[in-house]
Image (tube, grey):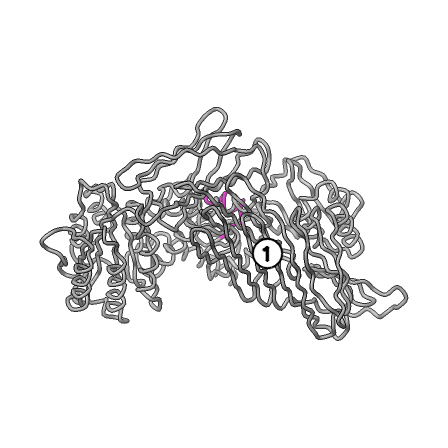
Amino acid sequence: MKRLLSAILILMGLSFAYSCRIVPVPPPDIVRPAVELQKIQVRQHHFQVTIQDGVATTVLETVFYNPNPRILEGTYLFPLPKGASVSQFSMWIDGKEMKGELLDAQKARDLYVSIVRRMIDPGLLEFVGRETFKMQIFPIPANGEKKIKLTYQHLLPKDGSLMQYVYPLTTVGNGREDTLGKLSFQINISSQIPIQSIFSPSHKVKVVKEENKATVSFEEEKAHPDRDFTLYLSSSDKKVDLSFVPFRQEEGEKGYFLLMLSPKAKNEEIQAKDMVFLFDTSGSMLAGNKIEQAKEALKYCLKSLRKEDRFNIVTFSTTVKRYQTESNLIEASKENIEKAVSFVDSKVYASGATNIEDGLSVALSMASRDSKRPFMLFFLTDGRPTIGATDTESILAVAKKANLPNLRLFAFGVGVDLNAKLLDAMAEQNRGAQEYVGEKEDIELKVSNLFDKVSSPVLTDISIEFPSSKETKIMDVYPKNFPDLFKGAQVNLVGRYSGKGDQVIRLKGRIGEEEQTFDYEVSFPEKNIENSQIPRLWATRKIGFLLEQIRLEGAESHLKKEVVDLAQEFGIVTPYTSYLVLEDDAQISQRPPTPRPGVWQAPSSTSTQDVSRQKEMEYAKKSMATESGKDAVETSRWIKGAKEADVAYESPKSESKSKAKADSMIKKIDDKTFYLKDKIWQDSIYQGKEKKIRIRYMSEEYLKLLTEKAAIGKYLALGPKVIVVWENVAYEIYND
């Protein structure tokens, strides 16, 4: 699809469009022969943002490259957020500064529609309804570059303490399917009120946060501008801040929400903790220098303990050894830490078998049952149990029998020759987390990263009371087990709701020895379409939860159906969801006449492609059932990624060829998913029972629809054949 170039370019005498966006303007009295031109490329796009007490200043720089042997002339177009003011546009030609024009939403809409009508290009339709900056550009040199710099300011929309910043990345390049040379941005945030939550559901950003300032950054080569960048941030003096982000497409439908919890804590408010390090020292740890890396990781953790903490060390191989034998836990004084580090250096070595059962029993016996402190167990192993209890259920029973309500178990699996299902279950059942360290990954880095995240507990034993009344009900909240809140960290929850109105969410937890209760007033709207990433984020997390239930407890038909339905609606297609379509091997040769979108169907012949697909199905099915080995570890990584997803658009990666093909037939635009079926992009929620209105592509009725319902433009931008459900009506765009 042709698009505008953060702008729209027209070659002299030729009319065509590019995105991000430059639109060509042919001289009226010169006629040139038709020449097929290459699209203008974006070699680099960078934006720098300063947000100070809710006012954002954005400076964007774009380097365009014209790969054609002719000079281009065009119009630069950039959609702006509501209420934005452009303070500077930098482009000089022969020493002369060029001036631009700010179009209001109505003028911009008329301009976009006229371009779309003239150029038969729907690519601009998703920008209808936005205020737009416009400027003429000439020349764009043949086989040369043109750099543009634009600065604008706007006040961030605010709801209570929560603010939202959005940057229109889909305007960059030649559309959502384009590949940019390089995309990067940095956001510097400062606030007189302490900064609490910072979260992007659209991109995996790096966040560095202090009390009153923060930096958010992102950089990617060969990036795809397939979604706008969205950032939520809040500032609050509350001890624990709660930010509420709702989404509801239609009145009467269930809504979605995101909850962001973040603590404000001084050092003296960080809870003291008890910590036991349970490390595998079996002979297999000698391979690849694993034992030395593990020792360095252990020493890092010891040196990072606070003086208020208590600790001990347990190592296991054929037998179990404990560092401190006179008492279960000792104070983390400077002297005790130095002695413990010396012990690790001189007394910890690898030999023997793997006795996880006894090692776990000894480590858990060190917990003080009378203490209200968090009891954290850091467990690291590179192998499967070989002596003592070796089956998953028997080892899990050890922790269950200990019955420690304050237990938080963090499991590290090194390599692939281990029981991944066991580690997953241990972490899940004991309110911890699991990490897997690849053969070429650094053990110390993985362990230290997680230790830093969980070493400073602020609010523990968290529970949340959601409203349950005739007016509003909450359901399907993920994660199911609420993790503790740590200093500098943030917990994000997603869920669904029905009803509407103002309600109170109650948060309970323990700060030190005291029980604390916090009440937050939130509003559940009847309709809100501003936060469209939330539904897919919720679906990704729920699929992760369901797949974990299937894997740990066995497949139930209703769980499988839920996974398949969610995969279809939200376009979350992976081998681990696709295989669930197959109830048994007999179905492999029975393809339904009309395939369901969003999930792979059983092949209808024994072609090479179908045989390959069968193998992929069987491989995925086997991986879900396997407890140990490489396949089991990769499955655990995938499920963990889905359960903890914070980015709405990125499905966990798969090397599957069938998945790659399926992905090419799926388009995700905000909250909606479209499937290419019979050369028509079809809305995933379309059932064929809705009231249907058929409209010819680029007809007067088509342009009228675009004018009256500007928000539908981003879906119509898919092309000349689309079925989209909007406000309970199915609009079918055709081009026959």
Crowding at mark 1 (Cα within 10 Å: few <14, some 14-19, many 20+): many
Left-right relation of 73 to 347? right
Q: Which is more toward the observer, 348 or 685?
A: 348
Instruction: Say if 735 sits above or below 353 in the image.
Output: above
Q: What is the x, y in percent for residue 362?
A: 15, 51
Label tally = 1
Q: Which is more toward the observer, 420 or 267?
A: 267
Question: Can residue 601 be seen at all in this image of the molecule?
Answer: no
Instruction: Please provide the residue range marked out in magenta.
Output: 562-573
Looking at the rendered structure, the secondary structure element under dot 1 is loop
Q: Quadrant of the N terminus?
A: bottom right
Task: Say if the magenta span includes residue 694.
Answer: no
Q: What is the x, y in percent for residue 433?
A: 33, 51
Left-right relation of 690 to 119? left
**Dot 1 amino acid type:** Asp
Given the current orientation, which residue lies at the most extreme left position?
A: 326
Q: What is the x, y in percent for residue 263?
A: 39, 45
- Residue at the image position 53 percent from the left and 29 percent from the top: 501
Given the current orientation, which residue lies at the most extreme top position?
A: 470
Question: Can residue 624 be seen at all in this image of the molecule?
Answer: yes
The part of the image, by quadrant, that contains residue 89 is bottom right
Is the magenta region chiefly helix, strand or loop? helix
- Residue at the image position 80 percent from the left and 55 percent from the top: 118
The residue under label 1 is 226
The part of the image, by quadrant, that contains residue 463 is top left
Instruction: Say if 119 sits above or below 68 in the image.
Output: above
Q: Which is more toward the observer, 347 or 379?
A: 347
Instruction: Say if 619 sits above or below 143 in the image.
Output: above
The part of the image, by quadrant, that contains residue 445 is bottom left
